[in-house]
Amino acid sequence: MRSSLFVLLALTGSASADGGYFIETVGGGVYGGDLAQFGNWDARLHLGGGYVRGPWALEASVSLFLPDQPYAPPCPTGKCLTFQEPSVDLVVGNLDVRRAWRILRPRFTSKIGIDFIVHGGPRWAVCDTPRDSYSGPGLGGGTGFEINLRAVSMFVDLGVDVAMLRSSSGRVITTDLPYFGAGMRLGWF
């Protein structure tokens, strides 16, 4: 009984909790634009950290697209060699501003509840394809819902990143990367 009371008190702290947190999301992303020729989609792992102050947060993170299918170039005769290399090796650096709105909370406290979240900001993408290596700036953002238990929260996130990537030879490609994910934030508020 006493430990249950301590857990309840820990979860019902200040509503405007400020502090840092770690974030991890697992999901998938779709390759659009010029990257679509190398594959349809890949698993996406998103890792980072942030600082929250009231309903606002600043997050720095990295999104890793984990290729699982080899790239096979088109073969008109059917007697071609297949290349066993990843279709796309893509890493995206993110710096997001995040805003949360409480949409549902229990009657006994306003410290925990369900939040609607929106986030967005600049991106920097680095991409290796079977043909060339690319890097360049972009923008991205998303929205989702979060079960916020103060120091721990679980969420679903839907978003899109767009980027204009340039190779060392000067070739420019554009891409859009819609994604989905489920994740967790763990912090010390």
Image: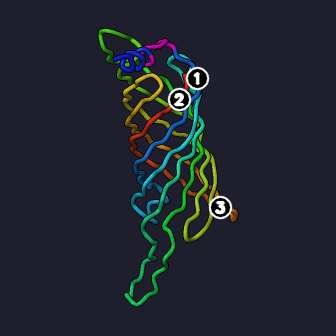
Left or right placement of residue 24 versus residue 127 in this view: left
Residue matched to label 3: 167
What residue does disc 2 label?
A: 187
Of the image marks 2 and 1, the number of the one nearer the N terminus: 1
Q: CA distance from mark 2 to mark 1?
A: 7 Å
Location of residue 63 in the rendering, given as x and y in whole percent from the top left corner: 53, 48
Mark 3 surroundings: few (<14), some (14-19) or many (≥20) residues within 10 A: some
- 3D distance between C-alphas at marks 3 and 1: 39 Å
Depth-wise, is mark 3 or mark 2 nearer the camera?
2
What is the crowding at mark 1: few (fewer than 14 residues within 10 Å), some, or many (at least 20)? some
Kind of residue at disc 2: Gly
Q: Which mark is residue 19?
A: 1
Asked whether the beta carbons under mark 3 and mark 2 sit within 8 Å of each other, the answer is no
Kind of residue indicated by mark 1: Gly
Query: Where does residue 144 sit, x and y in percent of width and height?
Result: 38, 32
Looking at the figure, which quarter contains the N terminus? top left
Q: Amino acid at mark 3?
A: Ser
